[in-house]
Amino acid sequence: MTVSKHIKPTRIALTTLVSCLIASAVIGIMIVLIGDFEETQIKILGTVAALAGFSLISLPSIFNLEKQRYQFIGKPGILMSLVFFLLILIIIWGSDEFGNELIGKLTFTSGVIAVALNHILLLFITKPNTRTLLFCQKVTALIICMVASIIIVGAWTEEMSDAVFKVLITLVILDVLGTISLPILGRINFKS
């Protein structure tokens, strides 16, 4: 089965994202103007916001799968984004028995994994032009995995020592540094 040039997964995801943002805005404005915050309206708003979030989070996976790159990260990335979205829907629309701690922790875990995998894929969109930048890109991806792991373990154990917290903050700073600086450094011509 071939897909038309005009029907690309990234185009569908972006269209869905914009449509959800418009729908969220319309529903939000209606709620404010009418002043009636019924449970169903809030659930619909939450669902539309969750769909927009799913579209946004999964965009790097969709982009890389469309380009047939990094499929070993893209497939789990889209899967975890979908699991996160479905768990959010269960929390929004489920009965009170779905509001338990296990569902909350599973939702949080799937969200952290989805964001981490798609963060790595976003980082890999840039193609480094030197070995040093390639090394830094891989180290930043490793740091993203470490940050996600520490956050998930902390959520499940519900405790984090000061030493682990300091390591986490240090890794987050390095993660931000790598995420912001690598694309910029990749654009600089080092052959001056």
Image (cartoon, helix red, strand yellow):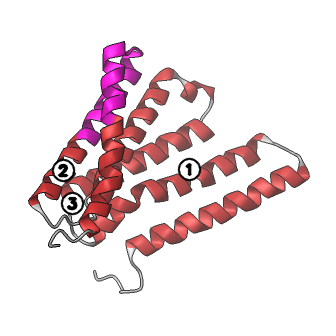
Instruction: Find disc 3 in the rendering and name its residue.
Output: 71
Between 79 and 29, the residue placed more toward the observer is: 29
Q: Position of residue 157 (x, y in %)?
A: 37, 16
Between 65 and 119, the residue placed more toward the observer is: 119
Q: Amino acid at mark 3?
A: Gln
Q: Quadrant of the N terminus?
A: bottom left
Pointer 1 local density, CA inside 10 Å: few below 14, some 14–19, many at least 20: some
* Labels 3 and 2: the sequence-earlier one: 3
**Relative side of 18 to 148, left or right:** right
Q: Which disc, if any, is residue 136?
A: 2
**Relative side of 30 to 48, left or right:** right
Q: Position of residue 96 (x, y in %)?
A: 62, 27
- Is residue 99 depicted above or below 80 in this figure? above
Distance CA(mark 1)–CA(mark 2): 33 Å
Between 166 and 101, the residue placed more toward the observer is: 166
Q: Position of residue 19 (x, y in %)?
A: 61, 67
Instruction: Find disc 1 in the rendering and name its residue.
Output: 50
- Is residue 112 depicted above or below 50 in this figure? above
* Labels 3 and 1: the sequence-earlier one: 1
Q: Position of residue 24 (x, y in %)?
A: 68, 57
Between 100 and 120, the residue placed more toward the observer is: 120
Using the rendered view, name the quadrant where residue 164 is placed. top left
